[in-house]
Image (spheres, helix red, strand yellow):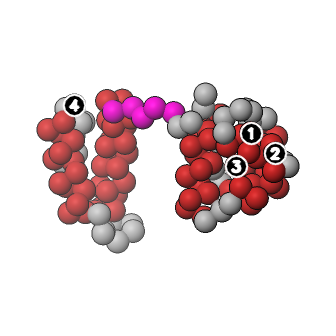
Amino acid sequence: MNIKPIRNDEDLHAAFKRLERVFQSQAGTPGADEMEILVTLIEAYEHKHYPMEATDPVEAIKFRMEQQGLTARDLEPYIGSSGRVSEVLNGKRRLSLGMVKRLHDGLHIPYESLLAA
């Protein structure tokens, strides 16, 4: 295993190529250890050099609705009445902390997405 820091996009490309070769390694093998290290290095480089903007909370909710085939009515246990759901989905009402917690616990939407503003 010859791992070195990822300092530029060329290093990143090489790390991805190597990751492709060790990706299916059995747990507990040197290949699996190398895969874990490479993933950590790649994530750190991408986080630093290609940061992603925070997701809009409403877009995060709509994305989860699409993923799970949910309707606005399905959100009532997490947000409240149908009128309140409509206000949230149309950007006319912000999420309360209670709504955020219920959406996170019930629909597994990351807190980071729900609290982004």
Mark 4–mark 1 distance (CA, rounded to whole Å): 46 Å
Residue of label 2: 83
The amino acid at mark 3 is His
Residue 7 got which mark? 4
Please indicate whether residue 12 sits to the left or right of residue 92 in the image: left
The amino acid at mark 4 is Arg
Judging depth in this view, the residue of 20 and 57 nearest the camera is 57
* Of pointers 2 and 3, the one earlier in the residue sequence: 2
**Residue ID at (56%, 59%):** 66
Q: Is residue 88 magenta?
A: no
The residue mark sitting in front, 1 or 3, is 1
Determine contact: label 2, label 1, CB under 8 Å.
yes
Q: Position of residue 7 (x, y in %)?
A: 22, 31
Mark 1–mark 3 distance (CA, rounded to whole Å): 19 Å
Residue of label 1: 87
Which contiguous range is marked in magenta? 50-54
Residue of label 3: 104
Q: Is residue 53 above or below residue 103?
A: above
The amino acid at mark 2 is Gly
Give the structural element (helix, strand or loop) at label 4.
Answer: loop
Determine contact: label 2, label 4, CB under 8 Å.
no
Residue 92 in which image quadrant: top right
Q: Is residue 64 above or below residue 113?
A: below
- Label 4 crowd bin: few (<14), some (14–19), many (20+), radius 10 Å: few
Give the structural element (helix, strand or loop) at label 3.
Answer: helix
Mark 4–mark 3 distance (CA, rounded to whole Å): 36 Å
* Of pointers 1 and 3, the one earlier in the residue sequence: 1
